[in-house]
Amino acid sequence: NMAEESKKLAAYFAVDNSVQNNQVVGVGSGSTIVYAVDRLAERVRQEQLNIVCVPTSFQARQLILQHGLTLSDLERHPELDVAIDGADEVDAELTLIKGGGGCLTQEKIVASCSKYFVVIADYRKDSKALGQQWKKGVPIEVIPMAYVPVSRMIAKRFGGEVNLRMAISKAGPVVTDNGNFILDWKFEHAQNWKEVNTAIKMIPGVVETGLFVNMAEQAYFGMEDGSVKVRK
Ligand code: DER
């Protein structure tokens, strides 16, 4: 369908334009990145590209292994050349909401270790202001024992509604790759995302937020007309 086609468009464009030989590549999580890993594997086969891949989740690790790509980690490669990842929403200033897939913490760590962080997304993620397209709120990873006081604190200080993310194929809450819970904060109005990100991170019990501020260098959007829109 159109959205899947546009994910593939963005993913192939990014891999073809942002990945060179002898590079360390951060591999994001979610559904769009699957196309990027397909293309990475294709380029390795066709061009004998020499790359190593650092995952951002169990899912990314599986993708790397399943495609026969060279798996690495931040102990071997604490500095990456490029990280490629999806996003739930991208605003006009390249501020991202990530974490729809619950992998935001390792994604943000890997992105922070990369010289170059590029986002791949379908046209639905292309937004002017956070909240215009994405209605599920900002994901926040929290230490399980603290999720109630953290939820209350966020709602009190920033407004909106905070919900514990419940699992679908498992009884009880979603548990992340790091053994934590996820809160989804449905904010009511635009914020100073840089300030809000810092303030939320300071709350004891918060592990990470899905607000990626001033991190992405570029975003590639696959459009419905088959073009790729680039935001820098
Ligand atoms: O959970 C995540 O952070 C994912 O990267 C998400 O933001 C994008 O997932 P998608 O490519 O399946 O939309």
Image (cartoon, rainbow, N blue to C red):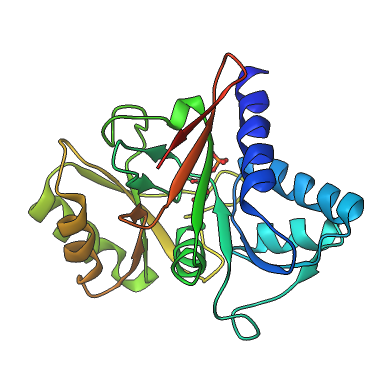
Q: Position of residue 211 (x, y in %)?
A: 32, 53
With respect to residue 71, does 66 lie above or below? above
With respect to residue 30, does 6 lie above or below? above
Q: Position of residue 30 (x, y in %)?
A: 60, 47
With respect to residue 47, does 75 lie above or below? below
x 66%, y 55%: residue: 19
Looking at the rendering, in which quadrant would you find the C terminus? top left
Q: As drawn, which residue projects farthest toward the top?
A: 225
Q: Is residue 100 left or right of residue 85?
A: left
Q: Nearer the viewer, residue 208 or 144?
A: 208
Residue 76, image quadrant: bottom right
Q: Is residue 115 left or right of residue 213?
A: right
Q: Is residue 40 left or right of residue 95?
A: right
Q: Nearer the viewer, residue 196 or 11?
A: 11
Would you say residue 211 is visible in this rendering? yes
Q: Position of residue 22 (x, y in %)?
A: 73, 69
Residue 89, image quadrant: top left
Q: Is residue 230 left or right of residue 32?
A: left
Q: Nearer the viewer, residue 196 or 119?
A: 119
Residue 7, image quadrant: top right
Q: Position of residue 72 (x, y in %)?
A: 71, 75
Q: As drawn, which residue projects farthest toward the bottom?
A: 75
Q: Nearer the viewer, residue 96 or 83?
A: 83
